[in-house]
Image (cartoon, rainbow, N blue to C red):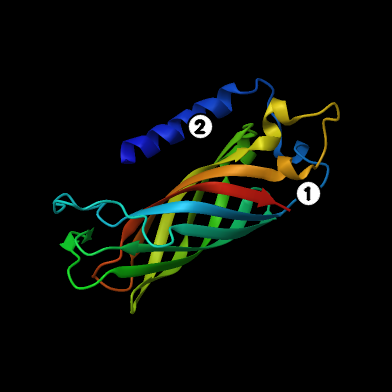
Amino acid sequence: MKKTILAAFFTLGLFGFSAQAQVIHKYERYMKEYKWRVGASYNMMDFNFNHSDVPEGAAMISGGIPAKVMIGYEFLPNLSIEADFSMNEMEIGNSMNGQIVTDETITIASFNGSLAYSLGGLINIPVVDPYIKAGVGHLRLNQTDLTMASAGGGLNIWIADIPATKSSRYHHDKFYRRIGLNVEAMGRANISTEGQGSHAQYSAGVFYVF
């Protein structure tokens, strides 16, 4: 599964560099300036990504309601503040940080605040916009609350930069051109205790700017 995710990132990156010879600056996408962005994604969590001795049967999880929602605001050029909330579920028999879950299913809720910097906006890459991201957040495992630090990155795929979406009028703000795709990989570390909670989170979904 990890190899598949990495292959998807690589393929999208190649698509972004080859889809259009002319570089489109981010401010040429629309007539208006859209600073807000909302998104919804499918997410998976890997609580054993940093463990070499993983028990048999351990796997990334996407149980319960594996949804992730986010909202972001670009307050400086290429720099945004974001908040995201996600849910997931780990069933009995799976492994969390190298330990088998035996007592009960673990319901997982995650809330994070982050700063994201657009590398695509910085160097004017069309279609595919890579970014880096870091922040702090809160993780709840059933009744256990943990403080998390996170770092990672992802790709925003701008439909507005794809030639097939353009009409005879170059600058336009139709709603479907403000929809994009997103893939993201984040590492999240438990900084409040020496116990469980550290994990990697992978997500893929859509976003809308307004």
Q: Residues within 10 Å of mark 2 (few under 14, many from 20)?
A: some
* Amino acid carrying mark 1 in the image: Glu
- Compare residues 158 and 176 and report the one nearer the observer: 176
Dot 2 falls on a residue whose secondary structure is helix
Against 170, is 31 above or below?
below
Q: How many marks?
A: 2
Query: Based on the displayed image, in which of its 4 quarters is residue 175 positioned?
Result: top right
Label 1 near label 2: C-beta < 8 Å?
A: no
Residue 116 position within the rendered picture, expressed as x and y whole percent measured from the top left: 55, 53
* Amino acid carrying mark 2 in the image: Leu
- Compare residues 127 and 109 and report the one nearer the observer: 109
Image point (45%, 35%), residue name: 9
Residue where numbered disc 1 is placed: 33
Q: Is residue 138 left or right of residue 51?
A: right
Image point (64%, 48%), residue name: 78
Residue where numbered disc 2 is placed: 12
Q: Is residue 200 left or right of residue 136?
A: left
Residue 174 position within the rendered picture, expressed as x and y whole percent measured from the top left: 79, 42
Residue 171 position within the rendered picture, expressed as x and y whole percent measured from the top left: 83, 35
Image point (70%, 39%), residue name: 26
The mark closer to the camera, 2 or 1, is 2
Q: Residues within 10 Å of mark 1 (few under 14, many from 20)?
A: few
Image point (14%, 51%), residue name: 56
Residue 58 position within the rendered picture, expressed as x and y whole percent measured from the top left: 21, 53
Against 200, is 129 above or below?
above
Q: In which quadrant of the rendered image does the N terminus lie?
A: top left
